[in-house]
Image (cartoon, grey):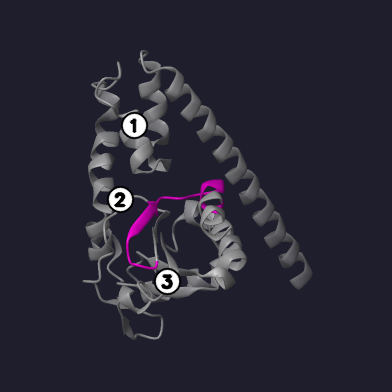
């Protein structure tokens, strides 16, 4: 029975990795369509589909008001997301105003890890989030690769129930620090940083400044390699 369960888990992991790879390929194709069709309305359809996977700079470039498709009604949501992304724009300091809980109920603030000599990746996730489950192996792999070089990862859950959060930690197998407000979508930290969809993340430098946001897949690895090369 245990052997069959192990095989099933391995198969699920393999399928999730394949789905993630396919998603990344589709996203890159959509980005190419957007770049090559600034004078064509077709870009609006692709931008509406993939804007959730773009960071601030990429989305701001795609939503340049001089683009032919800028006023297309499909882009209302993308424009709203761009406004939220400004809250976590590169160069802004991290926010230390929110009290977070660890699984054992202790209170913490981000300053316990930020501004302490390491690069800190704040990774937003939730136990119910399938895209988070698909992305988490990538976060874990990067953590294990760069932890000894100066990377810390803070997994901030937006769950609202402690038991679901703790089951998610066990299920995802995350080896790094776990924190949550247990306020679900009413999370103050999410509001401060304009987090409307997950997975999402912020990369904080040793001085406490945001240097990147929403790094997923290979983009996370490339950014960390550029830092720790």
Q: Quadrant of residue 182?
A: bottom left
Residue 105 counted in the magenta span:
no
Q: Nearer the viewer, residue 187 or 143?
A: 143
Q: Residue at x 41, y 76 (%)?
A: 163
Q: Is residue 98 visible?
A: yes
- 133 shown above or below 178: above
Q: Is residue 60 left or right of residue 155?
A: left
Q: Which residues are magenta?
A: 206-221
Mark 1 element type: helix
Q: Is the residue 218 above or below the residue 98 in the image?
A: above
Q: Is residue 113 above or below residue 90?
A: below
Quarter location, residue 50 = top left
Q: Nearer the viewer, residue 72 or 154?
A: 154
Report the number of numbered marks: 3
Q: Nearer the viewer, residue 24 or 221?
A: 221
Q: CA distance from mark 1 to mark 2?
A: 20 Å
- Quadrant showing the N terminus: bottom right
The structure residue drawn at horizontal position 73% and vertical position 66%, both measured from the top left corner, is 6
Determine which of the numbered discs, if any, sits on residue 165 in the image. Answer: 3
């Amino acid at each position: 029975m245990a052997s069959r369960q192990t095989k099933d888990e391995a198969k699920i992991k393999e399928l999730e990795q394949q789905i993630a790879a396919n998603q990344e390929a589709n996203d890159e194709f959509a980005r190419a369509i957007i770049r090559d069709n600034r004078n064509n309305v077709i870009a609006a359809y692709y931008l509406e589909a993939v804007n959730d996977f773009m960071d601030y700079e990429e989305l701001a470039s795609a939503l340049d008001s001089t683009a032919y498709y800028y006023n297309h009604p499909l882009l209302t949501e993308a424009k709203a997301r761009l406004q939220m992304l400004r809250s976590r724009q590169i160069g802004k300091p991290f926010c230390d105003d929110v009290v977070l809980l660890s699984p054992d109920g202790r209170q913490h603030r981000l300053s316990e890890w930020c501004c302490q000599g390491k690069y800190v990746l704040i990774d937003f996730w939730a136990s119910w989030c399938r895209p988070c489950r698909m992305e988490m192996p990538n976060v874990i792999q990067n953590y294990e690769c760069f932890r000894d070089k100066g990377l810390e990862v803070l997994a901030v859950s937006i769950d609202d129930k402690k038991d679901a959060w703790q089951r998610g930690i066990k299920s995802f197998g995350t080896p790094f620090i776990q924190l949550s407000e247990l306020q679900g979508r009413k999370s103050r930290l999410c509001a401060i940083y304009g987090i409307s969809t997950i997975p999402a993340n912020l990369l904080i430098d040793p001085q406490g400044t945001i240097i990147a946001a929403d790094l997923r897949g290979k983009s996370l690895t490339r950014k960390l390699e550029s830092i720790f090369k």
